[in-house]
Amino acid sequence: MAEPTLKELLAVASEAAYVGGRRALAHFNTGVEVEIKADDSPVTRADREAEQVVRSIIARCYPSHSILGEEAGHSKGDNDYKWIVDPIDGTKSFIHGVPLWGTLVGVEVKGRPSVGVIYLPALDEMLCAADGMGCTWNGRRAEVSRTSEMSEATLLTTNVTAAMARSDAYEKLAARARLSAGWGDCYGYVLVATGRAEIMVDPKMSPWDCAPMLTIMQEAGGHFTTWDGEPTIWGPDAVATNARLNAQVLAITKNEKRR
């Protein structure tokens, strides 16, 4: 069987994110029951159903590929093609009726993040990217902003309390930015990739939380790294920036004073 092209992988990732996201949306603002997992994070029927839908679409198209999902774990297969899925990134937003949550699908090809899709069902926005193919936002070209001054930047994070508890880096960034806000989870990365914000930081990260981000940010002209500047989706934390502010932001995160 011929190896799939990036265009083909992106088409399947887009379909899976869309259909899975619509399944989750069916439960949004319906009072769905919330359970607490062993790591103290919430999960709902919507998370599990959406992930199963995403997995079924991937398995139908590429039954030999491996899949890693937040809820159902790792399905063994060909690790040259590893699909990484978060059915609802931003479950806390989801259960509180806040529409800033998304369904994430990323694909690693031979160890390299190569395809990424973020679908925001409650907003009906989709961000898609593949290596060398650019990044689109609902079919239009997506690009990071050209802001070059920290004083003009918008800074985002998923959890302000956690960011401040980690070190002095977030406070230093916030003191220099024009605006700091908690528009977090995948929505914050979407805002950076589409030029509506400049900096997104997360003090803690799992691979399913950011599987699409590196490809999307690079193809939109920006950067996605750890706080130490390593471009990976497997790091313990994450920073996304536009191109012009990357060095200034990493100078602060790399030299943080831990608390």
Image (tube, helix red, strand yellow):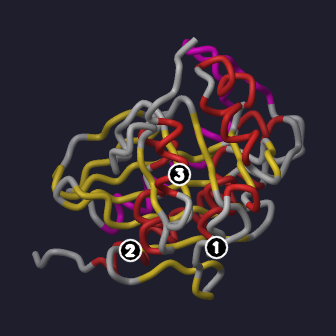
Q: Who's the residue at 55% across and 12% down the image?
A: 38
Residue marked by disc 1: 145
Dot 2 amino acid type? Ala
Residue 39 sits above or below residue 49 on the image = above
Q: Give the magenta part as a residue range.
A: 33-61
Residue 241 occupies which quadrant of the picture?
bottom right
The answer to which of 167 and 87 lies nearer the viewer is 167
Give the distance between the C-alpha atoms of the residues marked 3 and 1, in whole angstroms: 15 Å
Mark yes or no: residue 13 visible: yes
Secondary element under disc 2, as helix, strand or loop, is strand
Tag 2: Cα neighbours inside 10 Å, few (<14), some, or many (≥20)?
many
Q: Mark 3 or mark 1: which is in front? A: 3
Q: Mark 3 or mark 2: which is in front? A: 3
Total count of labels: 3
The answer to which of 197 and 129 lies nearer the viewer is 197
Residue 213 sits above or below residue 206 on the image = below
Secondary element under disc 1, as helix, strand or loop, is loop
Residue marked by disc 2: 130
Estimate the x, y position of residue 163 in percent, counting from the top left. 65, 27
Q: Is tag 3's residue or tag 1's residue first in the polypeptide sequence?
A: 1
Q: Who's the residue at 46% across and 42% down the image?
A: 208
- Marks 3,1: beta carbons within 8 A: no
Q: Who's the residue at 68% across and 53% down the image?
A: 188
Which of the image's four quarters has the C terminus? top right
Q: Who's the residue at 66% across and 29% down the image?
A: 43
Q: Mark 1 or mark 2: which is in front? A: 1
Residue 119 occupies which quadrant of the picture?
bottom right
Dot 1 amino acid type? Ser
Give the distance between the C-alpha atoms of the residues marked 1 and 2, in whole angstroms: 20 Å
Residue marked by disc 3: 248
Residue 19 sits above or below residue 229 on the image = below
